[in-house]
Image (cartoon, coloured by chain):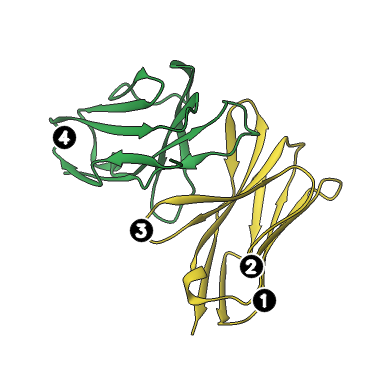
Chain colours: A green, B yellow
């Protein structure tokens, strides 16, 4: 199984809502990533988990809260988002957390904040 | 100046043509990645290389470490190759630094 799955595919939420994005992989990868991608732009790294511990937070606002309950699962909890947070949120995983490891990306969750 | 520069930004080709996308970077790297993103959004890793050349089907990736330059070639292009191709480099730690991408359109 070389797949990274993400749910939901699409999410529309109001600025006062709380929602969560979910990412799962069963490749035994020990690093997992959240990226944010705006239209016609490359992905921007948000968070990196290595061996279930948060290793990188790219100064992401606290309205985004990551969680790694186990080595296969990565969540992104969303609260009090702004319309400018509307974007494609991509999850990725890799065997290790160095930049020389190939990253496997999920299909993304397209988030719209109204 | 971006640390990773891709050219061209947009490329339109006829089916069957040989295509080259270029990537230049300005610092020492540990590895270079070529990624493909279709309009649906998902990103696929095509190649990861730190030296030489790799081939997979109709795709060939080369890297010249001294010149700080990599190319992605597509032979016998097909409309299904239409996508955004992104070059990304590993500079430090766990982060990849991405180029702005090349939008490729292959017409039948």
Q: Secondary structure at mark 2?
A: loop
Most extreme residue toward the top is A53
Report the disc number at residue B18: 1
- Callouts 4 and 3 in the same chain: no
The residue lying at 47 percent from left, 27 percent from top is A28
- Callouts 4 and 2 in the same chain: no
- Callouts 4 and 1 in the same chain: no
In three-dimensional space, the C-alpha distance between marks 1 and 2, rounded to whole angstroms, equals 10 Å
- N-terminal of the two: label 3 or label 1? 1
In the image, is B66 to the left or to the right of A39? right
Locate residue A23, reporting x and y percent.
Answer: 33, 33
Q: Residues within 10 Å of mark 2 (few under 14, many from 20)?
A: few
Choose top left, top right, bottom left or bottom right for residue B6: bottom right
Evaluate whether residue B1 shows in this view.
no
Q: Secondary structure at mark 4?
A: loop
Tag 1 subunit? B
Report the disc number at residue B58: 2
Tag 2 subunit? B
Q: Are marks 3 and 2 in contact (CB under 8 Å)?
A: no
The residue lying at 77 percent from left, 36 percent from top is B28
Tag 4 subunit? A
In three-dimensional space, the C-alpha distance between marks 4 and 2, rounded to whole angstroms, equals 46 Å
Locate residue A12, reporting x and y percent.
Answer: 17, 44
Locate residue A107, reporting x and y percent.
Answer: 36, 48
């Amino acid at each position: 199984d070389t797949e990274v799955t993400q749910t939901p595919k699409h999410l529309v939420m109001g600025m006062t809502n709380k929602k969560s994005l979910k990412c799962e992989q069963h490749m035994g990868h020990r690093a997992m990533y959240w990226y944010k991608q705006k239209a016609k732009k490359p992905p921007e790294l948000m968070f990196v988990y290595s061996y279930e511990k948060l290793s990188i937070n790219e100064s992401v606002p606290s309205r985004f809260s990551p969680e790694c309950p186990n080595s296969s699962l990565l969540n992104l909890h969303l609260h009090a988002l702004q319309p400018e947070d509307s974007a494609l949120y991509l999850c990725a995983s890799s065997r290790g957390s160095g930049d020389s490891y190939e990253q496997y990306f999920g299909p993304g969750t397209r988030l719209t904040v109204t | 100046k971006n640390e990773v520069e891709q050219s061209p930004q947009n490329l339109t080709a006829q089916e069957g043509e040989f295509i080259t996308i270029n990537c230049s970077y300005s610092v020492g790297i540990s590895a270079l990645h070529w990624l493909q993103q279709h309009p649906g959004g998902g990103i696929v890793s095509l190649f990861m290389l730190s030296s030489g050349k790799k081939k997979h089907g109709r795709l060939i990736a080369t890297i010249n470490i001294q010149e700080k330059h990599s190319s992605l070639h597509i032979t016998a292009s097909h409309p299904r190759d239409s996508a955004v191709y992104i070059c990304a480099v590993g500079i430090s730690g766990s982060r990849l630094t991405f180029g702005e991408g090349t939008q490729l359109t292959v017409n039948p």
